Image (cartoon, rainbow, N blue to C red):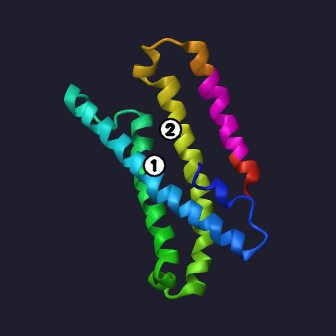
Amino acid sequence: MSGITPLQPPPPNTTTKKNRFKTHQSVMLGFALPLLAIGSSAMIYNKYLHGAKHFTTWHGKLGLISVIWVVAQASIGAASVWGGGKAFGGEEKAKRVYKYHRLSGYLLITLMLFTIHLAGIHSDWANGRGYTNLRILAYYVGLPLIWLGIELRSR
């Protein structure tokens, strides 16, 4: 989410737009993707250590879809800007890809927040931890408010 907020709302001038784009790339490549890789690897390794089955719940299945989607999203985004968009046949064609990359990002955020919701409210691990009121506040109130804030900034 911190990777898409610098891009919203659309900037009024080219200099601001370029700076926001650099921030987007820096956050996504230097922070978000490495954390996703570390977190996903830790989850898989923890299940391996305990002999637990993988991807048996909706949270697990949607989590796997989310990770695959993130990798595809990052690849398409990078291919559309690096090298002048040559991967898509030039800058003009790559610019057309941007609107789909952007829409995909908003849909991906929705999927990821829902996946987090499933983990925090409906997983066996979370249900065994207690803190029901705090979890309800975080996952039934907090996550929808995060989603709403992001969506209200989109144009």
Relative depth, front residue between 93 and 38: 38
Q: Residues within 10 Å of mark 1 (few under 14, many from 20)?
A: some
143 in the magenta segment:
yes
131 in the magenta segment:
no
For the point 51% across and 35% down, the residue is: 116
In the rendered image of this protein, does residue 66 appear above or below residue 20? Answer: above
The type of residue carrying mark 1 is Ser
* Relative image position of residue 71 (x, y in whole percent): 41, 59
* Relative image position of residue 41 (x, y in whole percent): 31, 42
Relative depth, front residue between 152 and 15: 15
Where, by quadrant of the figure, is residue 24 drawn?
bottom right
Element type at mark 1: helix
User: Is 62 positioned to the left or the right of 47 in the image?
Assistant: right
In the rendered image of this protein, does residue 101 appear above or below residue 96? Answer: above
Disc ID at residue 115: 2
Q: Note whether residue 52 is visible.
A: yes
Q: Are marks 2 and 1 in contact (CB under 8 Å)?
A: yes
For the point 34% across and 38% down, the residue is: 55
* Relative image position of residue 74 (x, y in whole percent): 46, 63
In the rendered image of this protein, does residue 60 appear above or below residue 7? Answer: above
Disc ID at residue 85: none
Q: Where does the magenta region start and end?
A: 137-149
In the rendered image of this protein, does residue 91 appear above or below residue 147? Answer: below
Where, by quadrant of the figure, is residue 141 drawn?
top right
* Relative image position of residue 50 (x, y in whole percent): 22, 25
The kind of secondary structure the magenta stretch mainly shows is helix
- Residue highlighted by disc 1: 66
